[in-house]
């Protein structure tokens, strides 16, 4: 019998510690395999079927990890400001106290030669955003500052499953940041983990069995 393919939460819910398990897992995958991941966007106010929530972005539709100069974890959040300063000739590190007071601690930071990605990981169906992570709050303000004041192309990306419960919060983020907000579906990440034969700790399951996003994803226009 062919195994049933389900969404990503059927795997993520087996490991309950997001900070100690799933964020390090995804970070390890980024560093070791340097994948190219599709970036999706919310379908806002135009859904004929309420279950269809996402589609592939038409522009800047990939996060290409192999182009990264730095892939960092939140524990070194002050360090990522120095890395940005060095690459883009800015002075963000002089405002580090403001950043800390605003509770901006991205789970993962990806810095290329011409772009900065702030990545938050929400791997469970019931995961939620904290205050600074929500629409028009500290994270959004920081992204806008980098884009508008520092002239650095910066995006805010959210890792979620296609069945993420708090979808409306993603819609609000996209309304706030427009094309500077995007979604990395765990189903796409697990598909790439499967393709790369990625191994992590005590995961014995086949990543490819947790890649079903069809019920929530609009395939039209995907090449």
Image: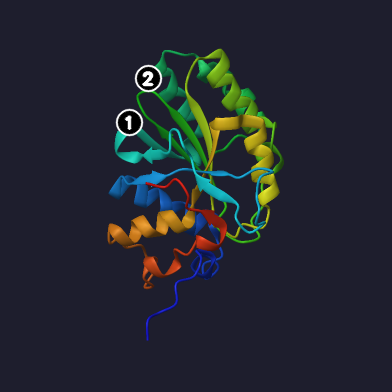
Q: Which mark is residue 69?
A: 1
| x, y percent for residue 142 | 60, 26
Closer to us: 205 or 202? 205
Number of other residues with Cα within 10 Å of mark 2, as a class: few under 14, some 14 to 19, many 20 or more: some
When the figure is inspected, residue 209 is found, relative to residue 18, above or below; the finding is below
| x, y percent for residue 213 | 50, 60
Closer to us: 139 or 105? 139
Quadrant in the rendering for residue 61: top left
Q: With 147 as the anchor, is 30 left or right in this view?
A: left
Q: Residue at x 57, y 23 (%)?
A: 96
| x, y percent for residue 210 | 45, 67
Quadrant in the rendering for residue 127: bottom right
Q: Residue at x 66, y 45 (%)?
A: 46
Q: With 40 as the anchor, is 172 left or right in this view?
A: right
Q: Can you identify the residue that label 2 sits on?
A: 87
Q: With 64 as the anchor, is 106 left or right in this view?
A: right
Q: With 73 as the anchor, is 140 left or right in this view?
A: right
Q: Residue at x 28, y 62 (%)?
A: 197
């Amino acid at each position: 019998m062919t195994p049933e393919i389900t969404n990503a939460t059927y795997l993520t819910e087996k490991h309950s510690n997001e900070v100690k398990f799933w964020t390090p897992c995804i970070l390890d995958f980024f560093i070791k395999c340097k994948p190219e991941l599709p970036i999706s966007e919310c379908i806002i106010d135009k859904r004929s079927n309420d279950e269809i929530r996402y589609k592939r972005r038409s522009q800047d539709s990939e996060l290409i990890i192999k182009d990264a100069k730095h892939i960092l974890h939140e524990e070194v959040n002050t360090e990522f400001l120095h890395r940005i300063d060095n690459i883009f000739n800015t002075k963000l590190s002089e405002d580090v106290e403001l950043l800390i007071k605003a509770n901006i601690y991205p789970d993962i930071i990806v810095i290329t030669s011409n772009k900065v990605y702030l990545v938050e990981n929400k791997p469970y169906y019931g995961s939620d955003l904290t205050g600074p992570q929500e629409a028009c709050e500290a994270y959004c303000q920081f992204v806008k500052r980098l884009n508008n004041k520092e002239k650095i192309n910066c995006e805010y990306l959210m890792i979620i499953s296609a069945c993420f419960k708090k979808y409306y919060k993603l819609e609000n983020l996209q309304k706030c940041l427009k094309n500077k907000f995007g979604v990395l579906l765990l189903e796409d990440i697990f598909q790439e983990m499967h393709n790369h034969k990625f191994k992590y700790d005590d995961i014995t399951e086949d990543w490819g069995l947790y890649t079903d996003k069809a019920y929530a994803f609009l395939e039209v226009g995907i090449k």
